[in-house]
């Protein structure tokens, strides 16, 4: 007879092998941002639909135009065939930037305005984790979402073009030759990463303003820069500050890419020049400072 006693599970003794799930506050904070801000992915999708509609309309008479384009030299033919796909990517990248800026401007201001900050602060999630999760949206989530939407949009465009050319007795090879989807996707992913890092101080500034301003966050975000540029112009007759702002918006292009309009294989990627650029690292340090201030503002500022 076995004298050992069996301890029922209801006795409150847990199995040593059972371990409680490790909380993941950062992961769930990012998920929260996606749940509460559907514009992060809805806006790019809507723009993609508009782009596709415009492209479908523009393909009227495409076979005749394609015959004329193929008579040009390779560089000009490539530029003409690839132009609609580049325009679609540019439109979606610009949309992602606008969405990212307005998301950051509302990230802290919104929860202060509707007083939901009182609830979120009651949870065991630090202000640093909250701010880092919010910064992750424009720096990581939006670029990845934009990448997926751009690739899907361009693929639909290429398939429609191929069907249209085949229906007119033409080979679709010119589309797939001059618009290599895999190579362009790699360039797109690299470009989105370069843009996101270069624009990091812009997003950091928007988060800071979102945590500080009591109203009109967009005006508070842009008016100081216009005032400084205007003051410099009328006082010293120079525009160094405006040039700095322009470089922060578009300066990633000449450092991350080497453009050669006479080459069929342009643009060339220059990650070495980009990563060694002082503008990149200075911008990242400024972005880190802005986010640090935003963390402190969220810690001590209550609802509006």
Image (cartoon, helix red, strand yellow):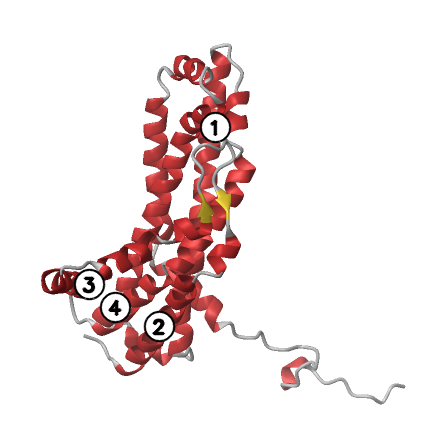
Residue 150, compared with residue 168, is above or below; it is below
Which is nearer the N-term, disc 3 or disc 4? 4
> What residue sits right under mark 1 in the picture?
158
Residue 215, compared with residue 296, is above or below; it is above
Q: Residue furthest bottom?
A: 3
* Mark in the foreground, 3 or 2: 3
Crowdedness near tag 1: few (<14), some (14–19) or many (≥20) residues, C-alpha within 10 Å = some
> What residue sits right under mark 3 in the picture?
225
* Mark in the foreground, 3 or 1: 3
Crowdedness near tag 4: few (<14), some (14–19) or many (≥20) residues, C-alpha within 10 Å = many
Residue 53 occupies quadrant:
top left
- Contact (Cβ within 8 Å) of mark 3 with mark 4: no
Q: Residue 210 got which mark?
A: 4
- Residue 48 x, y percent position in the rendering: 37, 38
Which is nearer the N-term, disc 1 or disc 2? 1
Is disc 3 placed on a helix, strand or loop?
Answer: helix
Which residue is rendered at x = 23% and y = 60% of the image? 240
Residue 256 relative to residue 121: left or right: right
- Residue 108 x, y percent position in the rendering: 28, 69
Who is closer to the viewer here, 138 or 287?
287
Who is closer to the viewer here, 61 or 251?
251
* Mark in the foreground, 4 or 2: 2
Residue 86, compared with residue 70, is above or below; it is below
- Contact (Cβ within 8 Å) of mark 3 with mark 1: no
- Contact (Cβ within 8 Å) of mark 4 with mark 1: no
CA distance for labels 4 and 2: 11 Å
Crowdedness near tag 2: few (<14), some (14–19) or many (≥20) residues, C-alpha within 10 Å = many
Which is nearer the N-term, disc 4 or disc 2? 4
Which residue is rendered at x = 38% and y = 50% of the image? 41
Which residue is rendered at x = 69% and y = 80% of the image? 15
> What residue sits right under mark 2 in the picture?
291
**Can residue 143 be seen from the camera position used here?**
no
């Amino acid at each position: 007879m076995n004298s050992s006693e069996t301890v029922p599970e209801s006795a409150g003794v847990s199995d040593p092998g059972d371990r409680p799930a490790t909380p993941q506050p950062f992961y769930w904070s990012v998920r929260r941002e996606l749940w509460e801000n559907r514009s992060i992915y809805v806006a790019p999708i809507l723009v993609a639909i508009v782009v596709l509609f415009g492209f479908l309309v523009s393909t009227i008479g495409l076979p005749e135009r394609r015959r004329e384009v193929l008579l040009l030299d390779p560089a000009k033919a490539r530029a003409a065939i690839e132009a609609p796909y580049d325009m679609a990517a540019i439109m979606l990248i610009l949309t992602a930037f606008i969405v990212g800026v307005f998301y950051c401007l509302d990230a802290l201001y919104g929860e202060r305005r509707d007083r939901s900050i009182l609830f979120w602060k009651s949870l065991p999630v630090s202000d640093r984790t909250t701010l880092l999760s919010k910064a992750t949206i424009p720096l990581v989530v939006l670029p990845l979402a934009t990448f997926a939407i751009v690739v899907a949009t361009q693929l639909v465009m290429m398939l429609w073009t191929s069907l249209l050319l085949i229906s007119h007795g033409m080979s679709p090879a010119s589309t797939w030759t001059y618009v290599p989807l895999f190579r362009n996707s790699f360039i797109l992913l690299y470009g989105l990463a370069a843009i996101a890092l270069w624009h990091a101080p812009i997003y950091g500034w928007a988060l800071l303003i979102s945590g500080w301003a009591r109203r009109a966050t967009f005006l508070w975000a842009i008016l100081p820069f216009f005032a400084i540029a205007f003051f410099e112009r009328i006082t010293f007759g120079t525009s160094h500050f405006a040039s700095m702002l322009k470089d922060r918006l578009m300066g990633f292009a000449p450092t991350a890419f080497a453009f050669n309009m006479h080459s069929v294989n342009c643009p060339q990627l220059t990650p070495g020049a980009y990563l060694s650029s002082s503008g990149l690292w200075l911008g990242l340090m400024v972005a880190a400072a802005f986010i640090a201030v935003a963390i402190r503002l969220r810690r001590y500022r209550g609802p509006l």
